[in-house]
Image (cartoon, grey):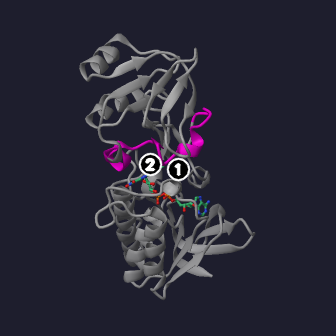
Amino acid sequence: MRYDTVIVGGSFAGLSAALYLARARRSVLVLDTGSPRNRFASASHGFFAQDGADPKAMLAAMRAQVAAYPTVHFVDEKAADAARDKDGFMVTLANGETVIGATLLLAFGVSDMLPELPGLAERWGQSVVNCPYCHGYEFSGKQLGVLNVSPMSVHQATLIPEWGPTTYFLNGGMIDPDASANLARRGVTIEPAPVDHLIGEGTDLSGVRLRGGHTQPLNALFVGAPWRLNSDMAERLGCAIEVGPFGSPTVTVDEMKATDVAGVFAAGDITRMGHTITFACADGVMAALAIHRALAFGTDT
Ligand SMILES: Cc1cc2nc3c(=O)[nH]c(=O)nc-3n(C[C@H](O)[C@H](O)[C@H](O)COP(=O)(O)OP(=O)(O)OC[C@H]3O[C@@H](n4cnc5c(N)ncnc54)[C@H](O)[C@@H]3O)c2cc1C
């Protein structure tokens, strides 16, 4: 079956693109494996009209609204590979089936590479979080921590005092004197000892146990972990990939979300350093406009 667009990833970016393309009366196939990045969180914040909503319910509503358009089709299957074809792009699914898209939108998201620290993974999205704009407000005035996991962590530690008293856990790492002085100016306490494990009831956090035995009381820990792309499809299609200043990859796109491979577009977390639902949805809309233009005018953007 041939579609105007095959979308790899049916979450915030992919569904937003599908909605706009459907409203342009174009045929769309959405391939999705059902693992959006924020699936660990029970509440999502900062997206208008949905502040505090369950992210799974948000996506279910988005999908239902998109599915109401007759030109949109869904297959809950992994896109395993994609290659240029005389009619556009042939996408091979994990079950061996193939589909053709005149254009291709990559919106497969990223995965956080969490540090292996006992008690951390099971609190991810609850009391261990990455984005203060998404989850900081709910911990206003509480004991906050930032874990040193990448060169980005010291920047995060500088911001977090906006939300409450902050400890920066160097976790055995180093900090240069300028950064240390800046954190002191912001009132951040620096804890040099390595963190042994996290403690607390259920997914709540009550403290971190440091190597040496001391326990630091804590209600939320911010972890700006590096990420990886969920698929190497962009790379295999020949799309340029940039590695950002903190070592995490993004697919290179222009302002219309076109990659440097004609007919291939990309949207959402895979294309940017700042990650929110609002950005992902806006990216999907922009990509849809570019794809529609490419289909209508026979141009790439
Ligand atoms: C713990 C946590 C909490 C967050 N909370 C918030 C918040 O409160 N507010 C906010 O604005 N943002 C929040 N975010 C950020 C938000 O989750 C992302 O910015 C957003 O999900 C990005 O949307 P996306 O469509 O680009 O990617 P994703 O939502 O990650 O979706 C990618 C989709 O592609 C699918 N997929 C992957 N590979 C394939 C493949 N090969 N074939 C088919 N399908 C595939 C996945 O299953 C998934 O459904 C949070 C992030 C995290 C980690």
Which residue is found at the position 48% from the left and 73% from the top? 60
**Residue 33 location, x and y as percent?**
61, 64
**Residue 190 location, x and y as percent?**
39, 18
Judge: label 1 CB < 8 Å from ligand 1: yes
Q: Which kind of residue does numbered mark 2 sit on?
A: Thr
Against 172, is 299 above or below? below
Q: Can you identify the residue that label 1 sits on?
A: 110
**Residue 186 location, x and y as percent?**
26, 23
Give SS at disc 1: strand
Q: Residue furthest bottom?
A: 70
Viewer-proximal residue among 41 and 91? 41
Q: Which kind of residue does numbered mark 1 sit on?
A: Val
Answer whether residue 133 is magenta in the image: yes
Against 189, is 21 above or below? below
Give SS at disc 2: loop
Against 189, is 75 above or below? below
- The quarter of the picture where the C terminus appears is bottom left
- The quarter of the picture where the N terminus appears is bottom right
Q: Residue furthest right?
A: 96
Question: Mark 1 or mark 2: which comes first in sequence?
Answer: 1
Which residue is found at the position 51% from the left and 54% from the top? 37
Answer whether residue 289 is magenta in the image: no
Q: Which residues are drawn in magenta?
A: 115-137
Q: Can you identify the residue that label 2 sits on?
A: 252
